[in-house]
Image: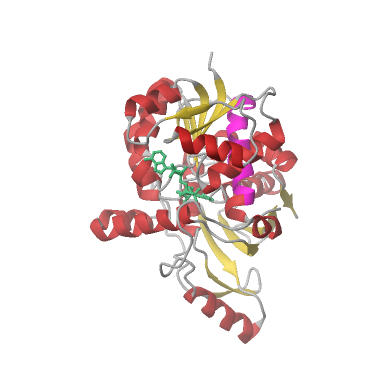
Amino acid sequence: MSEFDIIVYGATGFTGRLVAEYLNAAYGADGDLTWAMAGRSLTKLEEVRAEIGIPASVPLVTASADDPAALRAMAARTKVVLTTVGPYQLYGSELVAACAATGTAYVDLCGEPAWMRAMIDAHHEEAKATGARIVFSCGFDSIPFDLGVWTLQEAAKARFGHAAPRVKGRVKAMKGGFSGGTAASLKATLAAGARDAGVIRTMLDPFALTPGFSGPAQPKGMLPEYDSTVEAWVTPFVMATINTKNVHRTNALTGHAYGADFVYDEMMIAPGLGDIGKAAAEAMAKLNPFAGDKGPKPGEGPSREERENGFYELLFVGEMADGTTIRATVTGDRDPGYGSTSKMIAETAICLVRDVRGAGGVWTPGALMAAPLRTRLEEKAGLSFRVE
Ligand SMILES: NC(=O)c1ccc[n+]([C@@H]2O[C@H](COP(=O)([O-])OP(=O)(O)OC[C@H]3O[C@@H](n4cnc5c(N)ncnc54)[C@H](OP(=O)(O)O)[C@@H]3O)[C@@H](O)[C@H]2O)c1
């Protein structure tokens, strides 16, 4: 019997606070869902809990990311650890080890593929043995993409009898900013790549998260191009490197439910037609929102107004061998990275507590809990999934 359903680790950070606020607003402090806020400093946890209006009845748990014994003790008290302590490659390894060892479920917001691969190699078998369900990337990267492809493929199987061998993920529109923690994670990945060429190889390999399996060549998605399927210019999408790897891992973990020959890429649709669309695609490809040192510091991120005015709309197009197509759309009602992400990761943790059992291992959201999670996200978290 665990003391808590969920411990929110990193509750003093920008995204962790949003998760705690969401749990409090949606499930209350003293309701059926039992949860606690955790971090490395009790004083800061107390300050944040008061500042964001969370009742003092919500317990506080302290553990530093570099203290294996404290992390293990924390993991042993809960059914799920929900962690927003990042960059994960700097602060996350001991926590994954603690959850794998104690059989505790784990969800995070990781978009750092080289570290994820290292964790898969180190803990997948152990997690299978202890029953720990470890699930990375439970935010904007990669849930709407992972479940968007799954939704499309379920519809393709129902309509055509089999999955689409080629799927295009296209970001139609999105509005939102980024936080200091996200910028720090990207910088940590770039620094790791400068030290170790293996990190760059992992980033460039679409099958980096499917050990022992490499599928057919995948589109590189590094340059703007005209996409006749969507009749628009498309441009590279910054999150594609992580999402595409997770989608391929979902395929591998489900016994290649999308086929062993599955081809998938993600690009952003540029606004405008003809030469205007081309110019927009080229200009967007040159933008680097993470450039310079003027961005948000750890703990900072988009304002409440920016989060509430944000949104996203994603299109997935499946192409069958005979050229027939099928389309699905995914939308979210807040800014992707924080307003929507904080609801998504909270509901994913609740899905692990209430809706899904499943074996231990290092999972993707799509491979472990696709149908119940999609239902939960539509009912609670402002997402919609529609097939045309
Ligand atoms: N996948 C997605 O869609 C998505 C969306 C949003 C965020 N993210 C990721 O989520 C992570 C967090 O982002 P953020 O902007 O919320 O970061 P943040 O504001 O910097 O928060 C980081 C948290 O980590 C804690 N921390 C740092 N070092 C620690 C240590 N040694 N021991 C224990 N706790 C420690 C901080 O505690 P203190 O307050 O004590 O410093 C803080 O609570 C990043 O990796 C980011 O890339 C991903």
Q: State whether residue 286 is above or below residue 323.
A: below
Residue shown at the point (44%, 58%) measured from the top left: 183
Pick the front one: 320 or 288: 288
Q: Does 118 sit left or right of 242 as displayed?
A: left
Pick the front one: 51 or 205: 51
The x and y percentages for residue 349 are: 58, 33
The x and y percentages for residue 126 are: 36, 26
The x and y percentages for residue 28 are: 69, 30
Colouring method of the image: secondary structure
Q: Quadrant of residue 376?
A: top right
Q: Which residues are magenta?
A: 339-355
**Main SS category, magenta section:** helix
The x and y percentages for residue 227 are: 59, 72
Q: State whether residue 193 is above or below residue 127.
A: below
Residue shown at the point (68%, 58%) measured from the top left: 305
Residue 343 within the magenta-colored segment of the rendering: yes
Residue shown at the point (51%, 55%) measured from the top left: 300
- The quadrant of the rendering that contains the N terminus is top right
Q: State whether residue 208 is above or below residue 44.
A: below
- The quadrant of the rendering that contains the C terminus is bottom right
Q: Quadrant of residue 53?
A: top right
Residue 298 within the magenta-colored segment of the rendering: no
Q: State whether residue 213 is above or below residue 2.
A: below
Pick the front one: 360 or 306: 306
